[in-house]
Every structure is written in C-alpha cells, then in structure tokens.
Image: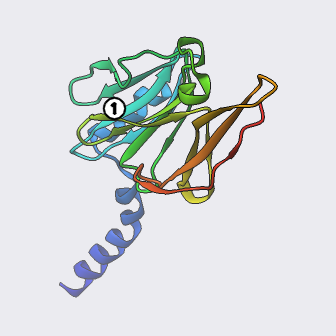
Amino acid sequence: MHRYRLILTILVFLLSPLLAMSQTPIANRVKAKAERKKNGDRIVAKYTDDRRHCLYFVRSNRLFRYDALTGATSEVVFSIQGYNKIINTWLSRNGNVVFVLVDRSALTSQPLADGQEVYSVNSFTGKSTSIGSGVQCVMAHEGYFYITHLVAVKRRPNMTKEYIVEDQWFYDDGRPLWVKDRRTWNK
C-alpha cells in the first residue's frame, strides 16, 4: 500500500507541470483564431475565461470580436460619428478595458477640439464609451494617459489666433484624474 502511494505521489509530481500547461477548449479556440490571423490583423486582447471567451483584433482599421463559443466574428461599433483610422489600441492594467484611439481629423472642422478621440470598450459587457477628444492622446507611465484638447481661441490684434489647450489626464481604466494647466498650442 505504501509503495503505491509513493508511486502515485511521484507521478502526480512529474505530471503536474503538464496538467498546468493544458488549456480549456475555449482557450484552444482563442489561441487557434489568433494564430490564423490574416496579414495586417493586429491582436488587441485574448480572453479565455468563461465570461468573456473571446479575441479582440483590428483588421482594416476596424475593431472585431471573435466569440470562441459561437465561432462568430462581429465588428465592435464604438463610434457612431465615424473615424478615419485606428491610431492605437491598448488595455487597462487589469485587462478589463480595451481602449481605442481613432483619428477623426478629416471628418471635423475643428481638429484641435476633436481630431482624435479615445473610446473604451468593457470586455465583460461589450459596452463602449467615449472617453474624450482633442488634438492628441499621449500614453504616460503605467497605463495613465492624457488628451490635449482645445479650451479657447484668442484673437490677437494682428488678426492671428492663439489656441489655448489643456491636458486632461485619465487613470489606466479611463476615469478622469486631473487637468493640467492651460497653455498655448504651437502647431
């Protein structure tokens, strides 16, 4: 009896790394879809848990979601106003929020006010929200980011304009953090 227990203990010890590396069928489907990506596709996030079981990827300046349970791929519509292209995508530190930075400069008459726009997509619910817009979005340390946006336009006596901007900072999950001092924007 003691001998069998010893053999069983040794087998469990030797096989446990292999068992830990094995994946669920959902994880295997997500991994297989990521490996079969087309040229130009960019993987944004892989979720293999039971609640999300999906893959987010960018194809032809559109964000898509592949559902590993149904095998369906659908476009994630986050902007009803339209945009020219997706500039960048990133995840919050905990991975629960997908951020999408888009270029709208050709679609607006005020590129300093809304030339770029940041959206968030909740990976659990699929709900998208507009975070903010401005002339540029900059990633800072540890997932924090800020959007520089137009605050005011001053007219000078020589008929030139002075553009006043400020930086709106955000936490890594998209909540507003603080606003930095106003300054003149030099194009």
Relative to 10, does residue 135 appear above or below in the rendering?
A: above
Picture residue at 34% right of the left edge, 57% below the top: 19
39 is higher (above) or lower (below) than 24: above
* Amino acid marked by disc 1: Arg
Does dot 1 land on a helix, a strand or a loop?
A: helix
The residue drawn where x is 31% and y is 18% is 74
Q: Quadrant of the C terminus?
A: top right
Image height check: is 36 above or below 95?
Answer: above
Residue at 35% in and 26% down: 65
- The image shows residue 18 at horizontal and vertical percentages of 40, 57
Compared across the picture, whether 104 is left or right of 121 comes to right
Where is residue 55 shown, x and y percent of the image? 38, 33
Q: Residue 86 at x, y = what percent? A: 54, 24
Q: Residues within 10 Å of mark 1 (few under 14, many from 20)?
A: many
Q: Spot the residue most to the right.
A: 158
User: How many numbered marks appear?
Assistant: 1
Instruction: Give x and y (percent) for residue 3.
Output: 26, 83
The one nearer the camera, 17 or 44, is 44
Residue at which label 1 appears: 29
